Image (cartoon, grey):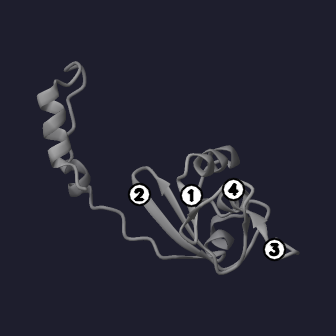
Amino acid sequence: MAADDGTVRVESWIWSVRLTKTRALAATACRAGHVRVNGERVKPAQPLRAGDEVRVQQAGRERIVVVSQLVRKRVGPGPAAECFVDNSPPPPAPEEIAALGVRDRGTGRPTKRDRREVERLRPR
């Protein structure tokens, strides 16, 4: 279902093409500054046009997509993939994720020394 006037709200489009699970999460991400359109932080009601570059930070990963088609209603995974061009870097390998410091469950609160070691292992 394509938009008529050539614009659509950012949070609505992010939800419609399945970049977030709910529209409320999309709006919250916009308000928190995790969504950028053409390099600028946006509010949830910001109009979005075809050709805009949208960057969404989620779960420690950045999704970079270029809008190719505007939709107002949530669509299935097949049609959603046709609505944008995904320029995101590939997700990190499981080995890289495991390299981050992971504490055993029930070992208590990390000490200052433990926190420094975890920070040293984290990529910047």
Residue 11, numbered circle = 4
How far apart are the two marked residues, 4 and 1, measured between alpha carbons? Answer: 9 Å
Q: Is residue 99 left or right of residue 37?
A: left
Q: Is residue 70 left or right of residue 80?
A: right
How far apart are the two marked residues, 2 and 1, measured between alpha carbons? Answer: 12 Å
Q: Amino acid at mark 3?
A: Ala
Residue 96: % across, % down: 22, 56
Q: Are the two marked residues, 2 and 1, in contact with CB atoms closer than 8 angstroms? A: no
- Work out whether residue 59 or residue 34 is closer to the camera in this orientation and state it: 34
**Pointer 1: what residue?**
35
* Mark 4 or 3, nearer chain start: 3
Residue 102: % across, % down: 22, 37
Q: Is residue 14 left or right of residue 64?
A: right
Residue 2, numbered circle = 3
Q: Residue furthest front?
A: 40
How far apart are the two marked residues, 4 and 3, measured between alpha carbons? Answer: 16 Å
How far apart are the two marked residues, 4 and 2, measured between alpha carbons? Answer: 18 Å
| Mark 2 closeness class: few <14, some 14–19, many ≥20 residues within 10 Å | few
Q: Is residue 112 left or right of residue 13?
A: left
| Mark 1 closeness class: few <14, some 14–19, many ≥20 residues within 10 Å | many
Residue 14: % across, % down: 65, 60
**Pointer 2: what residue?**
61
Quarter of the figure with the N terminus: bottom right
Q: Are the two marked residues, 4 and 1, in contact with CB atoms closer than 8 angstroms? A: yes
Q: Residue 117: which quarter of the image?
A: top left
Q: Amino acid at mark 2?
A: Arg
* Mark 4 or 1, nearer chain start: 4
Q: Amino acid at mark 1?
A: Val
| Mark 3 closeness class: few <14, some 14–19, many ≥20 residues within 10 Å | few
Tell us which disc is closer to us: 3 or 2. Answer: 2
